[in-house]
Amino acid sequence: MPRVFWRYLHRKGHILSTRFPRYEMLERYMTRPRSSLVDYLQLHRMVEGVQRLEALPYFVSKLVRGAYVFENIEYLELRYTPYLRTSESSAKENRLQQMEEVVDIIAEAARLPDYPVRMPQILCLHSRLPYDVNRRMVELAAARKDVICGIDLAGPDAEYEPRLDEWIELFQWAEKHGVRRTGHLFETPSGCIPGLLPYLERIGHGIQIPLRHPELLAEVAKRGQCLEVCPTTYLKTGNLSEISDLRPVFERCADAGVDIAICTDNAGLHNVRLPLEIENLLTEDVIDFEMLKRCQDSARKHAFAAMN
């Protein structure tokens, strides 16, 4: 994906093409480790600034093709914040209305007969967006279940706690209207907010539960929640120093009966696709093939859209 991003910049003569005249420069910039999650998320802002309405078909079609050809993937949940793909020059109400256009553009661009990947969308509420924008995204998810399979909570997790009542209200509304729910939670020490856990079906990352709060594992297992573990991300954000640091995550979750799905989070930002994530875990003896099979079964079990 860094290569796809670079090619787009140069094909369109984007201003960023002068900052990264050679692909290797962009790859080094995008894949180097960051000092924190907040620093890592700055990369998202750069990409979001490019992936506006007119650019979405290009990026989505390349994503689907790459997932099918290079990763042998048939089912992929695409999570993103639609408001951040609308036109910044438009008035707020116009941007809110454009969100459904974003959803439709992505759905249409993902329909590639030669690369039959099923790609339902997950809309990400964002900790730095106001309540009314996040509310409209939840309502959009409820209205467009034909292409949207759930909602997520993303953004700097240190900003979750002051708005905890808002997130709970939005997740409760989503549940009442049959919208599936996950959230980036317990990824970092600042994102450890037990009060949000009861409202989620899956936990985005969640590695700090077995590492720092194993007393919560029994409740997670009882609710049948699944952790979405993205190994390379934790090295890039500085949350872990070695991939082997994930060994107790898998071991403690297995002992407690908590499901784990192995994910990529965003291969476009670290250039590590799902097969290599799995290979790295196996090479470092973080998991064995029996555990891999359990994680693959968990991924299918907890998919938000039915896998046919």
Image (cartoon, rainbow, N blue to C red):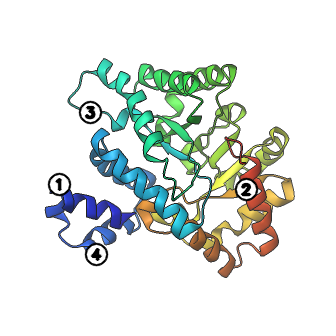
Which element is circle 2 on? strand
| Disc 1 to disc 2, C-alpha distance | 40 Å
Q: Earlier in the sequence, mark 1 or mark 2?
A: 1
| Disc 4 to disc 2, C-alpha distance | 34 Å
Tag 2 residue: 260
In the image, what residue occupies the spot 34% across and 38% down?
85
In the image, what residue occupies the spot 57% across and 73% down?
276
Q: Earlier in the sequence, mark 3 or mark 4?
A: 4
Tag 3 residue: 87
| Disc 1 to disc 4, C-alpha distance | 17 Å
Which quarter of the rendering shows the N terminus? bottom left
Which element is circle 4 on? helix
Most extreme residue toward the front, as rendered? 113
The disc at residue 259 is none
The disc at residue 24 is 4
Left/right placement of residue 108 relative to residue 279 reads left
Circle 4 residues within 10 Å: few <14, some 14–19, many ≥20: few
Q: Label 2 sits on what residue type?
A: Ile
Left/right placement of residue 227 relative to residue 266 reads right
Residue 241 image offset from top left, x and y in percent? 54, 70
Q: Earlier in the sequence, mark 1 or mark 3?
A: 1
Q: Is residue 269 above or below residue 82?
A: below
Residue 35 image offset from top left, x and y in percent? 40, 61
The disc at residue 14 is 1
Q: Earlier in the sequence, mark 1 or mark 4?
A: 1
Q: Label 3 sits on what residue type?
A: Ser
In the image, what residue occupies the spot 18% across and 55% down?
12
Q: Earlier in the sequence, mark 3 or mark 2?
A: 3
